[in-house]
């Protein structure tokens, strides 16, 4: 489960090193080539490599020294040692010192592919496990919210800061970003944590219903009010009251709520006796409430009362770094709850998700993983386990890869053979299986200096 695997190739024979670099690049890896160990050591200090191919015999620092250095400083970096026929013993020594593999020159393309693929798989699994451990550690510290991205760190810092200041709080964010989770976290870190978190959705109810549910009413206050009803706000002494979708609250209810907040007391509908309150209100909305207030769709005075502190929850597209973490977390969660042995996600499937925009944010990702874990017959979620409309993106991701055209490939190949034959055209034509005249024509077409 990884972006691009970064590979270093170290070989004092420049041509051989470059050839290996190109073969690996064709497999989609990000490769840097070095002709000696020192520059590689410097580079390694500033940028992480996942895998290193090193020649065993080099004039300055040999492959064993590279291996020892990587083992010492390169946490999680795997090393593959390349050796000539004469030095099998040293290759075995390299294995004993923790090399992932050794390979005998000349390298065969298939072998390189397999080696890199297997090493990549091993590294991927390890990163995935780490990802999951991190996710679980992070979740424990802050009641179920997953996220290591800087924007989420800001949200966590804000939650901690406001939890115990008993102020009203407004949580804004697009649908499915985790607003309720944030509200619950604030509650569970506050001094009200042993009282209830009372949730009320202001959307989709009539004015009368909201009024009687939230504020209660006296017996006989209106036709049908056959008994006194204690409203949710009144019955929530000591609690946190979460008013979800506050932007949907009808204007007349907004006035009532404003009075409740200002005076910290409440009148039941039809009642004359004020009742003192001790609640904390956390409101949430997926609208931009300030703009709504400016446009006259929401009471400005109420907005300012609620907006003592605002926490803005970022969209998932604004914190793509968290996608893999959330995937691991949800896979583990659903594998356990469905009793299935699903352990991860295949690279192509994870790449699709990494490139997806998630209009439904974390909730959408959660649903995608739930579905995939339920459907899959594999240990790792496959592209075919993703919903069809998202699977379509695979093609777009493939298109985005930097594929060469056949012409570009041919040009590059001719250049390689020319370089290897020291610009000998006869030999090049022979190796390429072309008549000399055809080679000359191609050279002209491709703009080689002849
Ligand atoms: N950072 C996160 N870590 C783990 N789970 C998350 C995270 N964010 C959201 N979720 C999960 O995604 C789902 C949606 O979260 P939540 O209900 O808090 O979103 P919301 O912003 O209130 O959405 P809406 O605006 O649609 O009400 C929940 O199941 C929640 O557990
Ligand atoms: Mg919600």
Image: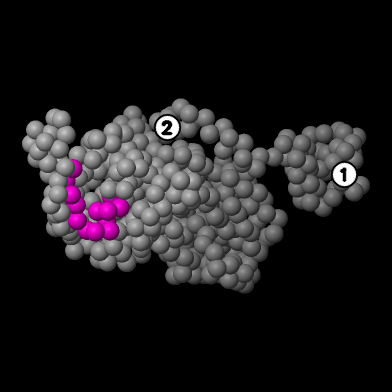
Q: Is mark 2 within 8 Å of ligand 1?
A: no
Q: What element carries label 1?
A: loop
Residue positioned 50% across, 57% down in the render:
50
Coordinates of residue 106 in the picture (x, y in percent): 62, 50
Q: Does the magenta stretch include residue 262?
A: yes
Q: Does the magenta stretch include residue 11?
A: no
Using the image, determine if residue 104 lies above or below residue 341.
below
Tell me if 436 is positioned left or right of 2 in this view: right
Coordinates of residue 324 in the picture (x, y in percent): 42, 48
Which circle's residue, 1 or 2, is located before the other in the chain? 2
Q: Give the range drawn in magenta.
A: 257-269
Can residue 5 be seen here? yes
Residue positioned 47% across, 60% down in the render:
77
Q: Mark 1 points at which residue?
A: 447
Q: Mark 2 points at which residue?
A: 386
Q: Is mark 2 on a helix, strand or loop?
A: loop
Instruction: Look at discs 1 and 2 and give the one toward the viewer.
Output: 2
**Residue closer to the observer: 296 or 98:** 296
Using the image, determine if residue 209 lies above or below residue 415.
above
């Amino acid at each position: 489960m990884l972006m691009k695997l970064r590979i270093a190739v170290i070989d004092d024979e420049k041509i051989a090193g470059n050839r290996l670099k190109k073969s690996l690049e064709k497999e989609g890896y990000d490769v840097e080539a070095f002709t000696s160990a020192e520059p590689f050591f410097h580079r390694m200090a500033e940028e992480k490599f996942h895998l290193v191919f090193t020649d065993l015999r080099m004039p300055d620092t040999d492959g064993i020294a590279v291996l020892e250095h990587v083992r010492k400083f390169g946490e999680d970096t795997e090393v593959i040692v390349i050796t000539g026929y004469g030095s099998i013993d040293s290759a075995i020594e390299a294995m004993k010192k923790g090399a992932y593999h050794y390979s005998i020159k000349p390298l065969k393309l298939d072998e390189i592919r397999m080696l890199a693929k297997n090493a990549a798989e091993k590294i991927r699994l390890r990163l995935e496990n780490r990802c999951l451990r991190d996710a679980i550690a992070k979740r424990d510290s802050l009641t179920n919210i997953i996220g290591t991205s800087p924007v989420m760190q800001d949200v966590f810092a804000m939650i901690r800061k406001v939890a115990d200041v008993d102020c009203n709080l407004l949580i804004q964010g697009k649908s499915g970003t985790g607003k309720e989770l944030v509200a619950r976290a604030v509650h569970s870190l506050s001094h009200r944590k042993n009282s209830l978190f009372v949730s009320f959705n202001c959307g989709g109810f009539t004015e009368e219903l909201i009024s009687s549910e939230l504020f209660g009413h006296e017996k006989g206050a209106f036709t049908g009010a056959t008994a006194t009803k204690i409203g949710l706000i009144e019955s929530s002494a000591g609690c946190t009251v979460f008013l979800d979708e506050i932007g949907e609250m009808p204007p007349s209810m907004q006035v009532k709520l404003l009075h409740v907040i200002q005076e910290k007391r409440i009148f039941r509908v039809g009642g004359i006796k004020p009742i003192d309150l001790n609640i904390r209100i956390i409101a949430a909305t997926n609208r931009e409430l300030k703009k709504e207030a400016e446009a006259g769709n929401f009471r400005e005075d109420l907005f300012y009362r609620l907006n003592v502190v605002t926490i803005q929850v970022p969209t998932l597209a604004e914190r793509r770094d968290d996608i893999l973490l959330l995937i691991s977390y949800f896979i583990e969660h659903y594998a356990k709850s469905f009793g299935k042995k699903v352990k991860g996600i295949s690279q192509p499937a994870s790449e699709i998700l990494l490139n997806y925009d998630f209009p439904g944010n974390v909730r959408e990702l959660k649903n995608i993983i739930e579905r995939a874990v339920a459907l899959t017959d594999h240990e790792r979620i496959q592209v075919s386990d993703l919903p069809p409309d998202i699977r379509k993106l695979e093609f777009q991701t493939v298109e985005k890869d930097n594929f060469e055209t056949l012409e570009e490939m041919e040009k590059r190949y001719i250049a390689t053979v020319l370089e290897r034959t020291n610009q000998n055209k006869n030999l090049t034509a022979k190796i390429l299986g072309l008549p000399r005249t055809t080679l000359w024509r191609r050279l002209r077409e491709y703009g080689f200096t002849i």
